[in-house]
Image: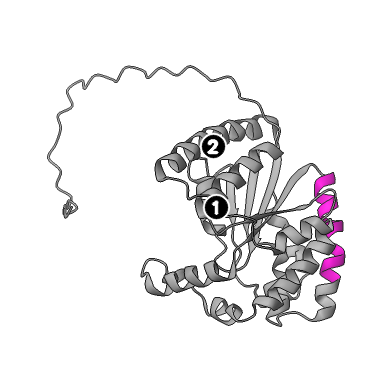
Amino acid sequence: MSAQKRKSAGAEPAASPEKIANKDYERALRDLHVELVHLQEWVKQKGLKVCILFEGRDGAGKGGVIKALTERVSPRVFRVVALPAPTDREKSQLYMQRYVPHLPAAGEVVIFDRSWYNRAGVERVMGFCTPEQTETFLRGAPIVEKAMVHEGIILLKYWLEVGMDEQTRRLEDRIDDGRKTWKLSPMDIASYSRWYDYSRARDEMFEKTSSEWAPWYVIHSDDKKRTRLNIISHILAQIPYKKMPKQKIVLPKRQKPTGYKEAPITCPLVELRY
């Protein structure tokens, strides 16, 4: 990664654009969803293998981006992988081993909500791996990723860069909102005070793993709506696709009842409260 890109990754954006209106956001997102459906059909028909991974600090907005990206496409094609903490058996394996079975086959888009880069981030900062293990990973990741690309996988790596104040606001919102408390783990709390340790880890990760064949793409994510729109637009621009011919579908006529009479429903009905 160039010095200019590394600098832009760590700095605040030059100016904060005006908040996008809800109606404009929904219209733009709908148009992008249509294009994602076209991409989906192209991936299926051409047997493409696409791997997209999202990294960033806690509260950077990875979940919201993934939800916006996948809410109008088939989960059979767009598959989300969010692995839990490794088991004792997995800890004894080669580090990358537990990720390999989840890589895309032909006709699939696999999205990693955090990935093998856990080793360069949370595992490193929180002391779950040794400095030697981190160094081994940083040397080996570009080699593994080059092999993935050589085998025809389109690999896209995104880092969501949230500002310090915005991260605080989002984590406090998780504490106060009963719908979001599940998002706040003990690890999030422990990690919160280690801002600059994460910054140093991020900088070295960019330096050693942003390659010609698998560069890191960085987006400032304080504005959730613009982040989602711009990432989806960027993904569409990175994967050449064409609109597949649309099949004309005509609904057939329903069959005749031929003596069937509607019976009263005897099963318990759901109580209507709204």
> Residue 224 location in percent, x, y?
51, 54
Specify the label residue 24 is tagged with.
none
Of callouts 1 and 2, the N-terminal one? 2
Magenta stretch bounds: 136-150
Question: How was this image coloured?
Answer: one colour
Q: Is residue 156 left or right of residue 23?
A: right
> Residue 267 location in percent, x, y?
18, 50
Q: Main secondary structure of the magenta part?
A: helix
Q: Is residue 98 visible?
A: no
Question: What residue is at 45 percent from the left and 36 percent from the top?
Answer: 27
Q: Mark 1 = which residue?
A: 65
Q: Is residue 203 left or right of residue 266?
A: right
14 is higher (above) or lower (below) than 92: above
All told, the count of numbered labels is 2
120 is higher (above) or lower (below) than 222: below
Residue 141 included in the magenta stretch of the image: yes
User: What amino acid type is highlighted by mark number 2?
Assistant: Leu
Callout 1 secondary element: helix
Q: Mark 2 = which residue?
A: 32
Callout 2 secondary element: helix
Q: Is residue 220 visible?
A: yes
Question: What residue is at 49 percent from the left and 38 percent from the top?
Answer: 28
> Residue 208 location in percent, x, y?
84, 63
User: What amino acid type is highlighted by mark number 1?
Assistant: Val
Q: Is residue 182 left or right of residue 111?
A: left
Q: Quadrant of residue 143?
A: bottom right
Crowd rating for badge 2 (residues with CA inside 10 Å; few <14, some 14–19, many 20+): many
Q: Is residue 195 left or right of residue 70?
A: right
